[in-house]
Image: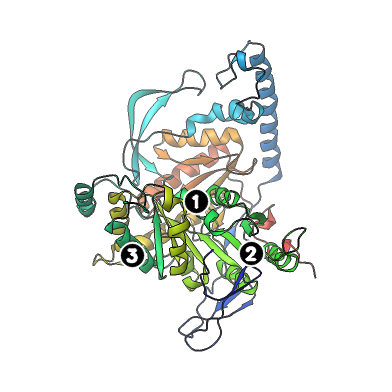
Amino acid sequence: MANPGGGAVCNGNLHNHEKQSDGSPSGNCAKNGIVKEAQQNGKSHFYDKPIAESFEEAPLHVMVFTYLGYGLGTLFGYLRDFLRSWGIEKCNAAIEREEQKDFVPLYQNFENFYTRNLYIRIRDNWNRPICSAPGSRFDVMERVSDDYNWTFRFTGRIIKDVINMGSYNFLGLAASYDESMRTVKDVLEEYGLGVASTRHEMGTLDKHEELENLVAKFLNVEAAMVFGMGFATNSMNIPALVGKGCLILSDELNHASLVLGARLSGATIRIFKHNNMQSLEKLLRDAVIYGQPRVRRAWKKILILVEGIYSMEGSIVHLPQIVALKKKYKAYLYIDEAHSIGSVGPTGRGVVEFFGLDPRDVDVLMGTFTKSFGAAGGYIAGRKELVDYLRVHSHSAVYATSMSPPVAEQIIRSMKLIMGLDGTTEGLQRVRQLAKNTRYFRQRLNEMGFIIYGNEESPVIPLLLYMPAKVAAFARHLLNRKIGVVVVGFPATPLAEARARFCISAAHTREMLDTVLENLDEMGDLLQLKYSRHRKSARPELYDETSFELDD
């Protein structure tokens, strides 16, 4: 990896010898969970409020019935598989051809057991096709199934004006065309849709360079590089930064793109408990003391992988503490701000601004344009040496087609709006409205007695449903009331922690939120979903710093 700090490297880790502008060495002091960062202006600037996150446990009887439901589903699944094997029940799943019965199976039958016997029965709650812009309201195409969700057919009816509580449209910028999008239309007419080349060949346009300069200015870093796909920004760039002989320390709840990128890199991967600094510090300390297994050589690099907002838990990374550990053990820090950029912080600049830290404290800043900016793609930002290195070595830069020009213009338009470069305060108002809507929605759900996860400032709000039958009933009943929600279950979540995930938007009016909350209140009573007893979580590693003791 390019040396972002320009300092000495020992044990594969950066030793940053830079000093602050006031002449004092860069440093930090941790006390009572609050990390004070010395800033360039010489003033102490840190997040001085306690990190308020909730991971309440479910009552015992709820967990018993949840596991009992999965147990009964498994038993009936084996019974139905037996009937299918004897031809008594038709098998609609993918199966091997008879002439290939002696081959190694192409379709792993048991691995699809859960999908075949449980997911299919409630599949109508996912992949619902919409036929409008994903604004605060959208239109849904009605579909029905005649074979228990193995196949669907459209009825031709459109469910109009469904309140959208599932899209990542945090700032409401993913909307139907209006005059504010005029520049996007002009770019489409001038440049067309596709680039038909990679960045290394003939695919770098002036729009790409304008966007990269704007991203760097927005994040207050030296340089940035943009990519056409958010998922690939992680999965294709992490292997360019680390490899064999390197160590990756990854949060246990990291997104699949981070997990895939780490695996493709060939580096050794070790997992630390979610947001648990004791667990992370133990891994860091052991890595520095013992080095690589067997040979005991020092690791070439140690890279910490975290997210800004965790999309399934709604929690926010404990960045000040992680930065303090990163500096203490001289490791690199890679942060994925896919959900947090544009949605948190006083001016929407993500968790670095949210905690009042210096962007230079994070070696690799990554984010996507698919959420707050109403577009597509992603970026990597940081020191110029880092970005220049990735321009040459990134698989996305070398092999992937460049970002579409109208998409780049939409991001430029959105980012200028947030920064106030359009001459208005509309962007700042949207950021503030999102924060206001988030706090209001979370507070009302808590008052109603639902168990919700995450940080009180996070616009991603998981509401725990637990039982698989209630997951299906919850989504179906709400759609009948013209409310569109995303429900999530295993394997995206732990088996017994199925949930609905609400994404709050600045475009939601108080009337919309009240309508949703009123219906949720009724659904909570109907399906008996109000489990909250205001107790701490049965998964203490999600929040309890002392749950992972360090060896002396």
Question: Which image quarter: residue 489?
Answer: top right
Specify the amino acid type for callout 2.
Lys
Residue density around tag 2, few if under 14, some if 14–19, many if 20 or more, within 10 Å: some
Q: How crowded is mark 3: few (under 14 residues within 10 Å), some or many (20 or more)?
A: some
Q: Which is more N-terminal, label 2 or label 3? A: 3
Amino acid on which disc 3 is placed: Leu
Q: Which of 423 and 282 is in front in this view?
A: 282
> Would residue 356 be visible to someone looking at this image?
no
Residue position marked by numbered label 2 in the rendering: 300
Report the quarter where the C terminus lies: bottom right
Instruction: State the residue at coordinates (62%, 56%).
Output: 250
| Residue 270 visible, this angle | yes
Secondary structure state at the residue bearing disc 2:
loop
Q: Where is residue 523 in the image (x, y as percent from the top left)?
A: 51, 39
Q: Is residue 198 above or below residue 277?
A: above
| Disc 2 to disc 1, C-alpha distance | 20 Å
Q: Mark 3 points at which residue?
A: 214
- In the rendered image, the residue lying farthest to the bottom is 23
